[in-house]
Amino acid sequence: MTICNFTPLAREVLEKRYLARNYRGEIIETPDELFSRVAGVVAGADRLFDAGASVRKTAARFEEALTSLSFLPNSPCLMNAGRPLGQLAACFVLPVEDNLESIFQSLKDSALIHRTGGGTGFSFGRLRPSGDTIFPASGVTGGPVSFIQLFDAATHLIDRNRVRPGANMGVLPVSHPDIRDFVTVKRDRRLLGNFNLSVAVDDGFIACVKAGRDYPLIHPRTGAVVDRLSAAELLAEMARSAWETGDPGILFLDRINRANPTPVIGRLEATNPCGEQPLLPYESCTLGSINLSRIVNDEAVDCEKLESLVHLAVHFLDNVVEVNRHPVTQTEEWSRMNRKIGLGVMGFADMLILLGIPYQSERAVVLAEEIMACIQRSAVAASGELAARRGNFPAFHQSVFPARGVKRRRNATLTTVAPTGTISLLAGASSSVEPVFAFEVQRRIGNEIFMDEHPIYARYRQEGRPIDPGIFQTAWEVPPHWHLKIQAAFQKYTDNAVSKTVNLPEHITEEQVRELFLQAADMNLKGITVYRDKSLPDQILSACSLK
Ligand code: UDP
């Protein structure tokens, strides 16, 4: 049996966020019991498909993968499996139609989802612009930005005393008449603390930027062109806001929809809060991540271990779709129709350090592609095998797969690179595909501050091994373009999207941010988010010295 090997920070995070508590708030399980609870509940789904299934064997395999910190599902799964809430997905998208019933229905649904630790994304693009008339009452609307503030206030209220703050993504198409308000709203730092914002940009807009042309603003209700804006000026405004505050990011919506597995059912208009999971309205997705630092043996990648972990993870995540208990009926129906899952990675930077490869190198880019291609290929095989026993996902015949000659697919999407903000702390791994933020770091979790040393760095130091600055490179030392190259390498073999924050040094200019946005558009990315050091007063991570 594998013994859990937690860092001191992981123990803190476990106690504060994950271990089950009784109604008096006392912890009532050990970390081993947590993993055994999750593995048992998720393995239980096997029984639904195969009367002779050995649930106990499956549970033991799942438990081994969790306990060895080789694979972890997203936080709601660890927190809620076998517990009263029972909701296991991290990502949801809800519809916002241009009427009060729809707006307040989704406001309520988002509250119910936040209570379970899920994050919600919305496109506000259908809402009529500010100043537009409201029928039958004679009056005018405040437009999308005012309604986003309503959702933000609700999130803030239900957030108090919760272990996982509610998170939201607000999306507005670049052609919406209120786009300038949307792009600049977070410059007032008191506003929208619970929202990430993304501008949904299409290929036409990027072409207008490059050609120095204006582009049309379109009334969402009537389809009429109401104004024209300089595309280059709007992009510059976006860059200025992102330089100042980190928001907005960009979603490249045409690229996202070219990868939509079910275009007949609907167009993808929004993502979950961190941008890695485009979803149709009412869809949800459970994410899971393989810890790449665990597949390095004797300074080489253990491909067989990676493949077998992918098979296990796809089995695990497909079971999650089955046992998940949704607080909203429609999200259950839609999520079961496409059965989207999102398998990704954490510990990529750790893997590079263990292999002696600089993050900023072509070798790292090639390795990123090889790793993700292997995960994608094995996930397709695993989903096909599951489909042979359990059936294709219900919307398979409305999907792009039959026309491509695919016969079996259990899940409309398989891969997503999540930020792994909390589960990477639990695994003691570098987060997602990010370079290490700092090897000695000060971290704010809720209201508390933790000082922490990167585990591999600490080990090298204790063993007196040389700390080669080329290998031990921090996020700030990696030039911005290389962040994008690694993101693009992972995106190439990822069905959904790759969550990546391009961490920028404090001295970068607005113009350089604008350039990066254009580079991202040319690199076939699905989105881009930047963050300039010290641009927010309550930054979660900062470099420190532990000596
Ligand atoms: N998320 C959320 N609230 C949070 C952190 C994350 O709702 O405080 C959701 C959001 O949809 C995000 C997704 O969980 O995009 C995955 O985030 P991450 O990988 O950081 O989550 P973890 O599983 O590590 O907690």
Image (cartoon, helix red, strand yellow):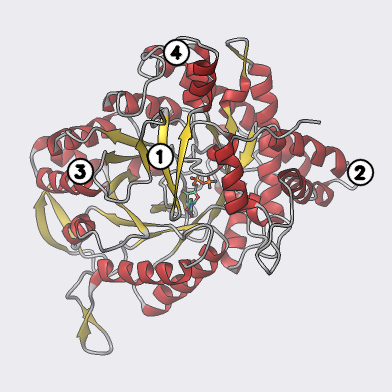
Q: Nearer the viewer, mark 3 or mark 2?
A: 3
In this rendering, would 485 be left or right of 120?
left
Residue 154 point in image, percent of width and height: 41, 72
Q: Earlier in the sequence, mark 3 or mark 4?
A: 3
Furthest-right residue in view? 52
Specify few, some or many for label 4: CA neighbours under 10 Å numbering under 14, 14-19, or 20 or more: some
**Contact? badges 1 and 2 (CB < 8 Å):** no
Disc 3 is placed on an element classified as helix
> Which residue is identified by label 4?
357
Disc 1 is placed on an element classified as strand
Q: How far apart are marks 4 and 2 (CA)?
A: 47 Å
Mark 4: amino acid: Ile
Question: Which residue is pictured at 62% across the width and 10% down the height?
Answer: 298
Front residue of 33/166: it is 33
Residue 467 point in image, percent of width and height: 43, 13
Q: Which of marks 3 and 1 is nearer the N terminus?
A: 3
Mark 3: amino acid: Trp
Question: Which residue is pictured at 51% across the width and 57% down the height?
Answer: 164
Mark 2: amino acid: Gly
Q: How far apart are marks 3 and 4 (CA)?
A: 30 Å
Disc 4 is placed on an element classified as loop
In this rendering, would 184 be left or right of 123?
left
